[in-house]
Image (cartoon, rainbow, N blue to C red):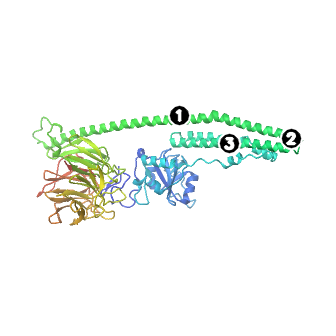
Amino acid sequence: MGTVRNGDTYSGNTSFSPNMPTGVLAHRNLGKNNLGGVIFGCKDNTLKECLSKQIFGLPSSHIVYVNHIEPGLPLFLFNYSDRKLYGIFEAASRGQMNIDPYCFSTDVLERTPYPAQVQIRIRMQCQPLPEDQFKRIIADNYHTSNHFWFELDHAQTSKLISLFASLAIAPSVPQYIIQKRTLSLPLLSEEARSDSADPSLSFEVNDQLFEGYASIQQDGGDEKDSIIAKLKELALSQEYQDLHLNHCSEGSSSTEGIKSEENSFIEAPVDLEEKKLQDFHSSVDLEDKKLQDCHSSSDYLTIAQLIQELEELKDFKMEQTQKMIDLEQKLVWAENEICYLRDHCNLLDSLLKSSSHDAVPEEIQSSEELDLDLKDSIIIVGGYDGSSWLSTVYSYFPSHNVVKSLMPMNFIRAYASVAKFKDELFVFGGGDGESWHDTVESYSLAENKWTVQPSLNAKKGSLAGAVLGEKIFALGGGNGQDCFSDVEMLDFDIGKWICARSMLQKRFALAAVDLNGAIYATGGYDGNYYLNSAERFDPREHSWAKIGSLTTKRGCHSLVSLNEKLYALGGFDGNSMVPSVEVYDPRMDCWMVGEPMNCARGYSAAAVLSESIYVIGGVKADEGIVETVECYKEGQSWRETSVRGIGQRCFLSAIVL
């Protein structure tokens, strides 16, 4: 995976932080198994060279994923001049550097500016797609309004191929075949008649059938779209052959009428003309017989073989799909087993360290044997551990210094938000390192299971959540391109998320909490700057209003309430992670400097349990991932706990049930 810098992650396709320096992300860094296709770029002045040389190229910085291209991988070509996408192409070689070191250069002695190259061939010729048609398919790849990453995952590639296939161009008939199809009348010169009855015509037309089938075999015959295109080509060639036969029969009828007319004026050359006509009819009959033989012996056989191959492809796809399902189930089982074993190891380690050196307990109880109540724990949800994006869920019991695994979520989630509603945990939004989610799910404490809930109206992450009365609120966030001021509200009476009153400012990576029947939203990033502003939503007035500003700009921070006060913890100020803490008293409408944490961190999670604030994980000022937990009680300093079961974790969420 990638590294973490100033709270940004460079391991996925989407910039999860708005503070990313210009030009840092040149690509999505999709793994070889996740790479479904690649878009290459050109302009009007290089489009012809791309197609004539059958080579696509990109700047050398793109070799990271061009190296992952294998023969047969779908490719597309984006023309910056007309903002259209051309396809469908596929790789005819592996991606590598300098297949042609001098292509796309203005000087024959100048080396190419686009050395990350791949040889290509046409898979299916289609009409080009304007940007407004394909942009919705690769919307997650756009990092500005006009620029997008070229790597495509399998889902995006499949959708693009389907869209292109609906605009496939029927294979054209070569002009020389059309010209030879228009047979001359026998009253023309003997030379012309000889040309018109050229028996090679039938073989030229039938060659198109065999060439079509051969090209399918060359292409591997493993793509349904290619096979369907070749079937269309065969049908079109068949139509041209039928037209040819009609022309021949029409020519015969015409010659008979003209011959009768000649008999009334010229008697002598009748036998000669009849003989020539008979020879002509014989050649046509012979041609017709050859065509029929070809049709019966090759056309139908070819089509039957293609149909059989399609059926085999369907069976193969079903078999592979079932294998994938089985593997996913085994993976889930393995992850649960790993969590179970890790819990026991962590428990043993914690208890051994907490026991006195003089007396080691004779028997150490497992977390199942301890009298643990989930309501006495902090629920830790998802995140990123430095190598993997997580769907795991843990309960952390500070009183026992124990971590216990719970049922994992249905989705991998980082940058998500959580809210407690009627003894259930709701998790919404976030991302999996490759894309943002609009999905929502809830965890039932009584049933120990996750249930899918109505989805948000938009995909988003780094959002905040709060609960007022019988409603759950999702605040702000972003999708890698835009920062939102939007607020959505889950209304259980109608079973969907509806739009509520938007905040006064756009806020990505904000923090929010509900206190005394109102929602407080603080800090975040508005697309240009990190904010120190704060606002409050009063449902009685149904509006947002500004409150006192923070003394420090903050994004990716945490916000909790303790003893009728708000605590803003750590975060990123636009330059670095900060350890500072600010305390807000609603009665005084001002923020005061609080006791700073021991560790400067952001993208951490915080929760209040037993009158204590716990801050878990996050990203440190030195770009590493935090594996410690800090605890604070009013009137005391921050202290680091000895728990080791959580491990390093960032972009996570936490809540107390």
Q: Where's residue 116, x and y in %?
A: 48, 53
- Looking at marks 3 and 2 on the same chain, the residue that comes earlier in the sequence is marked by 3
For the residue marked with disc 2, what is the amino acid? Val
Q: Secondary structure at mark 3?
A: helix
Q: Secondary structure at mark 2?
A: helix
What label does residue 308 carry, if any? 1
For the residue marked with disc 1, what is the amino acid? Gln
Q: Where's residue 562, x and y in %?
A: 15, 56
Mark 3 → mark 1, Cα distance in angstroms: 27 Å
Q: Where's residue 182, x and y in %?
A: 72, 47
Can residue 72 be seen in this snapshot?
Answer: yes
Residue under the image location 73 percent in, 36 percent down = 286
Residue under the image location 54 percent in, 50 percent down = 126
**Disc 2 packing (10 Å; few <14; some 14–19; many ≥20):** some
Q: Secondary structure at mark 1?
A: helix
Asked if marks 3 and 1 touch (Cβ < 8 Å), the reply is: no
- Looking at marks 2 and 1 on the same chain, the residue that comes earlier in the sequence is marked by 2
- Looking at marks 3 and 1 on the same chain, the residue that comes earlier in the sequence is marked by 3
Q: Nearer the viewer, mark 3 or mark 2?
A: 2
The mark tally for this picture is 3
Q: Tell me where residue 213 sits by quadrant.
A: top right
Mark 2 → mark 1, Cα distance in angstroms: 55 Å
What label does residue 270 carry, if any? 2
Q: Which residue is mark 3?
A: 204
Residue under the image location 65 percent in, 41 percent down = 207
| Left or right of 194, for residue 134 | left
The one nearer the camera, 561 or 278, is 278
